[in-house]
């Protein structure tokens, strides 16, 4: 039995590891240099990092209080909120982008775009697409991080004289800190790799809405395999780096 | 000090109903009761973590029923201590003062550290402390802000016996020196007997009996309280002309009690009131069976004429005498 389990784990490694290694077949150092010095690729990298960071910060601003509410309180509609967290995972990213695009074509969406920010085919659209994609996951992870904190500690702090905000800042938050950092890094990695919703809402305009995943898509469409491989390598470097840090933090928690 | 009246709380088919409970200032009060009796619910209502459907809780004649937990000025040691793992011992102890934005009273804290022996541990973190040390930290933390009432929720239940006794002594010392008002929630009879001046027995959601601990333990007034306190000598009795008739022994006994004639009542007597001699009345002849338990022996006296055994303190000879003053009635 143990052998079967270990074999399965090794198969997972073989599949993903093999796929990652396979891209090195087309790896070319001169293309890497060209890419790293290309204004267009640098713009895509900068756009990706900036948009993912902004989307993550916005998502955390909502996910942390929402996750705490889901972990600690009973309220009307809690079950629905909890189920809807999986909404971005259930609908395909392209469908999510399409829903956003459709929304900005209704009167309310139009009004928002006219009076506040233009989202369709813009940098704000990238941030919004990534924000909507990661919000569910961020809330789910934040909820799990708060559930790890013993409620008895919060009750004791309150009885000993702490107000709700004081105990949240001095007990809950410090004890959920590692879980929340992991939430931020995983959300950021997911935002960085977001493609479908961004493509549908923000488009594929070079020097405007081109992110790393979109650049990969465009290079592949042009049959530029070496360029594609280089960009995949960069995306992997950022994404796996964030995941590695996350795993380290989660390891420290458990 | 604390006065609870007509307090009602219902949840999931369980109802807690406290007609009246008084916790005296500068005294230790134990709240005893079997599991599921409502001890924790009552504690949560006192702490403000639950809201009652009706009733009143007064602290020094002022209602606290609408005060949030953080404004009740209570010290609290929960069952699992709840020491903050990310804070040092010192930070844990000073937490209530920081939370209440109060400057620490250095003299008082020094006294607490001296009494509890915590000074060498102040820079350590809870994870590195032994069970007894954690207990002391939780106790001192609960006292740091000079609370009006110290609530202890079975804090010693997880400790081994020698450590438990050491901490009982510490709590007694703290109570005496600092004139603390304590409410101790426990199901340990020995602990309640040693630590409390007063006690209340909570059974099935209501206070079955309250009173001074030695008196209540010695002469409970209710059958369920007597049973909970482990009384074995609890028998059916019928009032007769010359005293009380105990059907279990087929014998009439002289008694200071006056029970209603020809009516079934219940009487009890304490093993330590039984005399090992023959006086010509209230005597029973029989044999003693000793049941060995760890650090404890149950001595059963089996009367020759009788269906039930009687618990005795000593096993000597074949006669026992139950003095008329030993009998007391339980409802």
Image: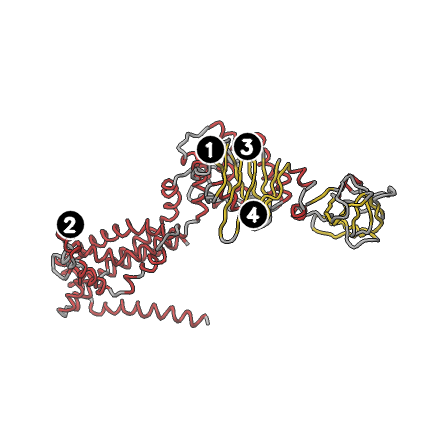
Secondary structure of the residue carrying tag 3 is: loop
Q: Position of residue A202 (x, y in %)?
A: 16, 59
Q: Quadrant of the C terminus of chain A?
A: bottom left
Comparing marks 4 and 1, which lies closer to the viewer?
Answer: 4
> SS for tag 4?
loop
Residue B171: image quadrant is top right
**What's the chain of the residue with tag 2?**
A
- Furthest residue to the top? B107
Q: Are marks 3 and 4 on the same chain?
A: yes
- Check residue B205 in the rendering and tell me which mark sits there, or answer none: 4
Q: Which residue is mark 2?
A: A116
Q: Chain of mark 4?
A: B
- Residue at screen point 21% across, 62% down: A99
Residue at figure coordinates x 13%, y 58% from the top left: A121
Instruction: Output the chain of dot 3.
Output: B
The answer for how far apart the CA atoms under marks 3 and 2 are is 62 Å
- Residue sitting nearer the eye, B176 or A192: B176
Q: Residues within 10 Å of mark 2 (few under 14, many from 20)?
A: few
Per the model, the C-alpha gap separating discs 1 and 3 is: 12 Å
Q: CA distance from mark 1 to mark 2?
A: 51 Å
Residue behind mark 1: B145
> Do callouts 2 and 4 point to residues on the same chain?
no
Front disc: 3 or 4: 4
Whole-Å distance between the Cαs marked 3 and 4? 27 Å
Residue A80 image point, x, y percent: 34, 58
Q: Which residue is mark 3?
A: B180
């Amino acid at each position: 039995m143990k052998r079967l389990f270990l074999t399965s784990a090794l198969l997972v490694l073989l599949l993903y590891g093999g796929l990652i290694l396979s891209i090195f077949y087309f790896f070319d150092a001169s293309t890497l240099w060209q890419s790293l010095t290309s204004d267009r690729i640098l713009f895509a990298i900068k756009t990706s990092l900036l948009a993912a960071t902004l989307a993550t910060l916005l998502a955390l601003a909502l996910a942390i209080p929402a996750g705490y509410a889901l972990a600690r309180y009973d309220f009307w509609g809690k079950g629905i909120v909890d189920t809807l967290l999986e909404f971005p995972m259930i609908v395909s990213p392209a469908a999510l982008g399409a829903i956003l695009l459709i929304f900005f074509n209704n009167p309310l969406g139009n009004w928002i775009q006219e009076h506040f920010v233009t989202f369709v085919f813009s940098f704000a659209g990238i941030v919004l697409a990534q924000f909507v994609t990661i919000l569910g996951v961020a809330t789910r992870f934040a909820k799990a991080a708060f559930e790890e904190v013993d409620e008895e500690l919060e009750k004791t702090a309150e009885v000993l004289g702490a107000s709700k905000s004081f105990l949240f800042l001095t007990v809950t938050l410090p004890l959920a800190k590692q879980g929340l950092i992991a939430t931020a890094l995983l959300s950021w990695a997911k935002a960085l790799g977001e493609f479908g919703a961004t493509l549908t809402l923000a488009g594929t305009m070079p020097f405007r809405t081109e992110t790393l995943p979109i650049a990969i898509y465009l290079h592949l469409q042009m049959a530029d395999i070496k360029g594609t491989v280089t960009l995949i390598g960069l995306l992997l470097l950022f994404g796996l780096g964030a995941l590695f840090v996350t795993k380290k933090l989660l390891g420290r928690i458990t | 000090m604390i006065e609870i009246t007509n307090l009602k709380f219902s949840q999931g088919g369980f109802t807690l109903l406290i007609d009246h409970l008084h916790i005296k200032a500068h005294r230790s009060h134990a709240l005893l009761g079997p599991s599921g009796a409502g001890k924790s619910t009552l504690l949560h209502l006192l702490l403000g973590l639950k809201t009652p459907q009706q009733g009143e809780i007064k602290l020094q004649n002022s209602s606290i029923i609408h005060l949030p937990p953080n404004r009740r000025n209570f010290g609290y040691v929960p069952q699992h201590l709840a020491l903050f793992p990310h804070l040092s011992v010192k930070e844990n102890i000073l937490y209530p003062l920081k939370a209440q934005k109060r400057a620490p009273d250095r003299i008082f804290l020094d006294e607490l550290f001296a009494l509890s022996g915590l000074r060498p541990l102040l820079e350590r973190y809870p994870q590195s402390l032994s069970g007894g040390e954690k207990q002391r930290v939780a106790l001192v933390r609960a006292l740091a802000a000079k609370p009006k009432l110290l609530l202890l929720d079975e804090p010693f239940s997880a400790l081994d016996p020698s450590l438990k006794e050491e901490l009982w002594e510490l709590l007694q010392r703290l109570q005496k020196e600092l004139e603390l008002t304590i409410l101790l929630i426990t199901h340990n009879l020995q602990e309640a007997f040693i630590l409390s001046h007063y006690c209340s027995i909570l059974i099935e959601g209501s206070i079955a009996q309250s009173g001074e601990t030695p008196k209540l333990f010695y002469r409970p007034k209710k059958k369920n309280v007597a049973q909970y306190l482990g009384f074995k000598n609890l028998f059916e009795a019928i009032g007769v002309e010359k005293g009380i008739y105990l059907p279990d022994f087929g014998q009439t006994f002289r008694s200071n009690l006056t029970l209603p004639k020809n009516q079934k009542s219940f009487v009890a007597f304490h093993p330590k009131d039984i005399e090992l001699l023959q006086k010509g009345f209230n005597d029973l002849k029989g044999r003693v069976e000793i049941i060995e338990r760890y650090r404890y022996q149950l001595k059963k006296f089996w009367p020759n004429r009788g269906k039930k055994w009687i618990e005795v303190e000593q096993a000597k000879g074949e006669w026992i005498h139950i003095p008329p003053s030993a009998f007391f009635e339980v409802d």
